[in-house]
Image (cartoon, helix red, strand yellow):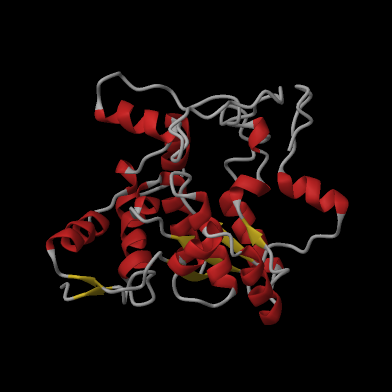
Amino acid sequence: SHDGQGKGGKAYSTVRSSQALVAPARCMVTHTWSGLFVDLVAAVVADALDLSEYGAVAEGLAGGHCEALRHKLQARGALDDTYWICAFCINQHCSICGSFSPEPQQRTVAHAKWDADRRDTVTGEVFVLCECGEPQVLNDNPDECELNKFDQMMGLLHVEVQGFRHLVVVDRQFRVFSRVWCVAELVEAHFSRIEQRVQLCSCKGLHDDDEDHDLYVRLATLTVANAEASRPEDKDAILARIPCIREFDAQLQAAIFGQHGLLNRRFHGFD
């Protein structure tokens, strides 16, 4: 939120907490910013309603059936459940609101992806950058930066909030597992024994056919060393905090496919 006069901006959660008493988040949400916003909201609503997938909720939201969903949340006593979503809980005005990520070399696959990510998925228009004027604080000032403290935040809430858990919103392209911030959060929760849940668009089993086999191979060969970040500095900062990439990758595979992994029961017919 900002005043539109170039005099700075605040996180949405800060504005809300100054207006009313807001309970600490009982669930942290990991998601990729390349996913549809309606899917993110739908996944949170589906989780609050204890549903196993968010596809139908996304259709309801897109169809304007918000009041019906609100009534369902109210009937379940979940309307005031609190979730940590970085887009609202971190002050994006002091980090990334005024620019896009560095432009890759033109006429490359990376440039095509970069150009698509900076455009509205409906209109195709380039997003308008924020003019709040808030001073930017990034990795070069780690103590003041808000972007680099997800593990400390998760640890604090895990200790102070009874039943604190972690929700992983899997986008329709499964890109959440290729983003370095998301991977780091996933492994942190797994390593800290924070209860983890997953929301997919559809819970129909992933079967041993060509398309799902490619997805399985992609997930089974994930390494944090190849994970993506909008800013190279972010990836460098995260990798610098990992003592052993091989051990981290093993934890990542356990978090995805292990006995209590997020996708342990989603794939059928794979060995």
The percent position of residue 121, horizontal first and vertical second, equals: 43, 40
Q: Residue at x 53, y 70 (%)?
A: 46
Q: Residue at x 58, y 50 (%)?
A: 150
Q: Is residue 233 left or right of residue 116?
A: right
Please tell me in which quadrant of the rendered image residue 147 appears: top right
Vertical side of 56 occupied by 265: above or below: below
Q: Is 60 in front, or is 85?
A: 60
Residue 252 visible somewhere in the drawing:
yes
Q: Is residue 258 left or right of residue 52?
A: left
Q: Residue at x 45, y 40 (%)?
A: 122
> How many numbered discs sit on the rendered protein?
0
The percent position of residue 177, horizontal first and vertical second, equals: 36, 53
The percent position of residue 249, horizontal first and vertical second, equals: 32, 55
- Quadrant where the C terminus lies? bottom left
The percent position of residue 14, horizontal first and vertical second, equals: 77, 46
Please tell me in which quadrant of the rendered image residue 109 appears: top left
Q: Is 63 in front, or is 72?
A: 63
Q: Is 14 in front, or is 254?
A: 14
- Quadrant where the N terminus lies? top right
Please tell me in which quadrant of the rendered image residue 230 appears: top left
The extreme top residue here reads 106
Vertical side of 178 occupied by 70: above or below: below
